[in-house]
Image: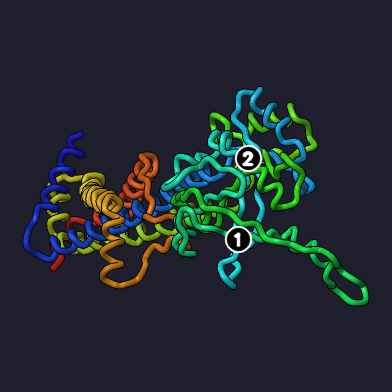
């Protein structure tokens, strides 16, 4: 204990600010560790925030579980499945999702049409919650569009939209082995006209830019399906993060003639990419901290060379090799702690003011740093998790101690007789 107390006292003495080269080297070491730790905190928080925000937005725009026909066909009587799901204690609604062409003058724009029962859909997708203008109570030939589509096409409440059904368009031509594609005689097709009664925004760019809602019965007619048919049944469960028990229960109840897919399975590839990216960023940025801790080794080696005579005097007065080693290890440890504290404050501050910093950069450079069309969100998401913070700090402390060991061992092996003669 006496060795440790003496070593700790000497470490603090060597860190005492003096206007010399040693102070400058110590400050550089602290700044290096702080930048490495701060950068690691910022990047991991952004990756975590992006993943969490994506999952939240995804759950806002889709159901926890999708029940579909495995052959890719429509479900002719989805209400039976809805009733079964409700009997198990889950919320459910039938939907029809198809692609269509929206005509604006001579221009055709592809969009995703979602046929819903406006009285039931809010049990699985909160359309009313994200409605900005108008009403979400849809009747025949009425439509909900997003604010992005309204801005893109110059539309507003009460305006009319023309929708072309690809299913009906393809029925106007047939293939002849000799003539190729030829029009079907006496086959006339007229597109459907819809009135805009509501404008929504889920604040998820890819969904808002593509989706439109219409009444389910109108959707059946538009895509030439039987009345009441749907392409899927959407089911909401109490714990969307653990959908497996509900999946097994639904499969047992409705049989295996339908596919029961969780939102994680449907978006598994993208969620997997996010997880791999976070792991890789963690792995790569740890090397930034490792490089930063090398500055501690450099500063301690420099300090050892400057203090050889003092080290020799300490050992001549009876200091053990362990005492000398602890002195310099503690010095590296204290530098590391100061750097980690500074880096943590820097990282959390940058995360707190991230959107203001992005706005300032965008204003200064004129470049959109975080474009919505690529990242889906209007602001940069970030989440600082205590577990991540503790892992980063603990790992950084270990690296700082390791970086201190080599100079400490070198100092402990100095021979007093040679050190006192050192010039």
C-alpha distance separating marks 1 and 2: 34 Å
Of residue 290 and residue 362, the one placed in the foreground of this image is 362
The picture quadrant where one finds residue 119 is top right
Q: Is residue 413 above or below residue 63?
A: below
Q: Is residue 264 visible?
A: no
**What residue did someone put label 1 on?**
162
Horizontal and vertical percent for residue 246? 64, 30
Q: x, y percentage for residue 248? A: 69, 30
Q: Residue at x 44, y 59 (%)?
A: 284
The mark nearer the N terminus, 1 or 2, is: 1
Q: Count neighbours of disc 2 (C-alpha within 10 A) and say few if under 14, some if 14 to 19, many if 20 or more.
A: many
Q: Position of residue 383 (x, y in %)?
A: 37, 46
Q: What residue is drawn where x is 60% and y is 65%?
A: 103
Q: Nearer the viewer, residue 217 or 235?
A: 217
Residue beneath the point at 60% across and 68% down? 108
Q: Which residue is mark 2?
A: 262
Q: Residues within 10 Å of mark 1 (few under 14, many from 20)?
A: some
Residue sitting at x 20%, y 39%: 4
């Amino acid at each position: 204990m006496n060795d440790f107390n003496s070593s700790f006292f000497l470490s603090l003495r060597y860190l005492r600010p003096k206007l010399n080269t040693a102070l400058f080297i110590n400050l550089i070491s602290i700044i290096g560790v702080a930048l490495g730790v701060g950068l690691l905190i910022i990047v991991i928080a952004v990756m975590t925030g992006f993943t969490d925000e994506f999952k939240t937005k995804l759950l806002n725009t889709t159901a926890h579980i999708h029940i579909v026909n495995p052959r890719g066909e429509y479900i002719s009587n989805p209400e039976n499945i809805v009733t079964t799901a409700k009997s198990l204690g889950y919320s459910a609604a039938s939907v029809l999702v198809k692609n269509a062409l929206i005509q604006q003058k001579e221009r055709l724009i592809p969009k995703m049409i979602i046929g819903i029962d406006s009285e039931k859909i809010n049990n699985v997708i909160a359309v009313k919650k994200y409605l900005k203008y108008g009403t979400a109570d849809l009747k025949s030939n009425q439509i909900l569009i997003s604010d992005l589509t309204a801005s893109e096409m110059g539309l507003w409440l009460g305006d009319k939209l023309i929708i072309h059904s690809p299913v009906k368009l393809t029925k106007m031509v047939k293939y002849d082995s000799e003539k190729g594609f030829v029009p079907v005689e006496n086959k006339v097709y007229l597109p459907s006209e819809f009135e805009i009664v509501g404008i929504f925004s889920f604040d998820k760019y890819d969904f808002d830019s593509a989706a439109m809602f219409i009444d389910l019965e109108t959707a059946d007619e538009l895509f030439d399906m039987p009345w009441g048919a749907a392409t899927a049944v959407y089911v909401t469960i109490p714990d969307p993060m653990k959908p497996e028990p509900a999946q097994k229960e639904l499969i047992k109840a409705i049989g295996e003639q339908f596919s029961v897919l969780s939102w994680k399975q449907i978006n598994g590839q993208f969620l997997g990419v996010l997880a791999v990216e976070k792991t890789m960023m963690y792995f790569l940025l740890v090397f930034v901290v490792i490089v930063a801790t090398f500055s501690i080794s450099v500063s301690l080696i420099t300090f050892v060379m400057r203090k050889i005579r003092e080290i020799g005097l300490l050992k001549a007065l009876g200091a053990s090799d362990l005492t000398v080693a602890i002195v310099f290890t503690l010095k590296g440890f204290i530098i590391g702690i100061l750097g980690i504290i500074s880096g943590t404050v820097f990282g959390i501050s940058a995360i707190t003011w991230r959107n203001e910093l992005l706005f300032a950069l965008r204003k200064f450079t004129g470049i959109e740093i975080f474009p919505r069309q690529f990242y889906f969100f209007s602001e940069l998401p970030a989440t600082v998790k205590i577990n991540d913070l503790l892992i980063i700090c603990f790992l950084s402390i270990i690296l700082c101690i390791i970086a201190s060991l080599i100079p400490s061992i070198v100092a402990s092996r100095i021979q007093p007789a040679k050190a006192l003669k050192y010039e």
